[in-house]
Amino acid sequence: MKNLLTRRSIRRYSDRQVGDELLSRLFAEAARTQTMGNLQLYSVVVTREADMKARLAPAHFNQPMVTEAPVVLTICADFNRTTQWALNRKGHPGYDNMLSFMNAATDALLYTQTLCNLMDEEGLGYCYLGTTLYQPGQIIDTLQLPRLTFPVATLTVGWPDECPPQSDRLPTDSFVHHEVYRDYTPQSIDAFYTTKEQLEENRKFVQINGKETLAQVFTDIRYTRADNEAMSAELLRALHRQGFID
Amino acid sequence: MKNLLTRRSIRRYSDRQVGDELLSRLFAEAARTQTMGNLQLYSVVVTREADMKARLAPAHFNQPMVTEAPVVLTICADFNRTTQWALNRKGHPGYDNMLSFMNAATDALLYTQTLCNLMDEEGLGYCYLGTTLYQPGQIIDTLQLPRLTFPVATLTVGWPDECPPQSDRLPTDSFVHHEVYRDYTPQSIDAFYTTKEQLEENRKFVQINGKETLAQVFTDIRYTRADNEAMSAELLRALHRQGFID
């Protein structure tokens, strides 16, 4: 995995096409990822048509890479296929519940990340859109996702046309615990976060956003309680609509 | 990623130790994985002590690799650290909700899979335990996981002492859709599943379990409605206990 240490999210893509053959090979290779009971509880919807990208864009807050990338991949938790299989084979599927959603979401996310690591090795650029969970209803409508499927990840994919700076990461000690979870203290928070907070780009980010601290940019502007609560309600509605919760 | 195509889950490990230095390097490298807002919403709890493994084992149905593996890793969705950071920095964190749980679970699962791919490249063996979501309360107690953290994946890790046959996979066409999700028909189910059903090991699996079809082994024995519903209730109770849902 020679390219992992130099990876960055890529949001601008060249005109070069991403061939179907290449994509199919990566889809097949990524399927070696472990999966629950070998059921492969995921589906990938490939979007190449301009009008379909335009219809997906609002669900992703119209981030420009959705319409500009040659390919958009929506990876879905999928208990529909397994359920259809079982119904055609005298089985008694019972996957309309929260655990089954989480099992399928897990399969889908692990598959997604192997695909990302494979794309890094090929030199393909991609950007992971966390917005997928924000307004899932729009994505479900556009891609015609049936009951017992749910979009959990979106990747915009293409050949890189930029090389942005790498983002920083916390020290490993900050997220690795031995034997039991050692909770944080004001002192350990300082030790783990001060370097990050003092980086030139993060100080600038605080200033541009008119805040006093970096944490405030996240809690007061980017990921606020009000937004999180509204989008949680939408997420739960969509989980109900897709048959995973009552 | 030269070892991806030959990977298999490894449940038996040699006596050779997995060094702290190697693990730390892999933890750091895996952290290059994309993460929401660069917040790294995950934690890893490393279990090496025999009595801690013994306490974790029941939550994983006493699968022998939990006590036999030199290392057990429990990867957690973690909004606690970010919340503590924000509280120490005059922020207003609002991450006690379903969307935030899913965002952190996503970060944790993507991180987990990069770690798996890195371990494959090192020749380390591992087995992913899907049981993590079945009785999370026991794991939370044992590892002393605070509010706004949640265990989402467990890996048993060691140097391989077996080379089991690779499991089969469905054809790529069965899970890749173009532009819209094309729902399954009895004909497409036959086309996608017949090869799998006719494999010698799967026919044997059906016979051993005294069932008529492979699908029935999954729906009637391994992942039944009754179990899924009981464990969904436990999952929701644990999400409530950890502060992610009301």
Image (cartoon, coloured by chain):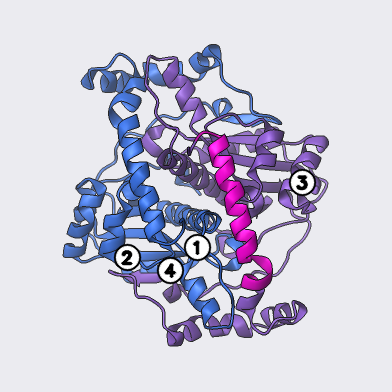
Chain colours: A purple, B blue
Other-residue count near label 1 (Cα within 10 Å), few / some / many at <14 / 14–19 / ≥20: many
The residue under label 3 is A57
What amino acid is labelled 3 in the image?
Ala
Q: Chain of mark 4?
A: B
Left or right: residue B58 compared with residue B95: left
Residue B14 seen anywhere in this rendered image of the structure: no
Magenta: main secondary structure equals: helix
Above or below — where is B93 with respect to A137?
A: below
Which region is colored magenta?
A: A218-243
Residue A213 on the magenta segment: no
Query: What is the residue that sits farthest to the top in this orientation?
Result: B187
The residue under label 4 is B25
State which mark lies toward you, 2 or 4.
2
Q: Quadrant of the rendered structure where residue A94 is?
A: top left
How far is disc 3 from disc 4 in space, using C-alphas?
38 Å
| Residue that appears at 64% across and 46% down | A154
Other-residue count near label 4 (Cα within 10 Å), few / some / many at <14 / 14–19 / ≥20: few
Residue A242 on the magenta segment: yes
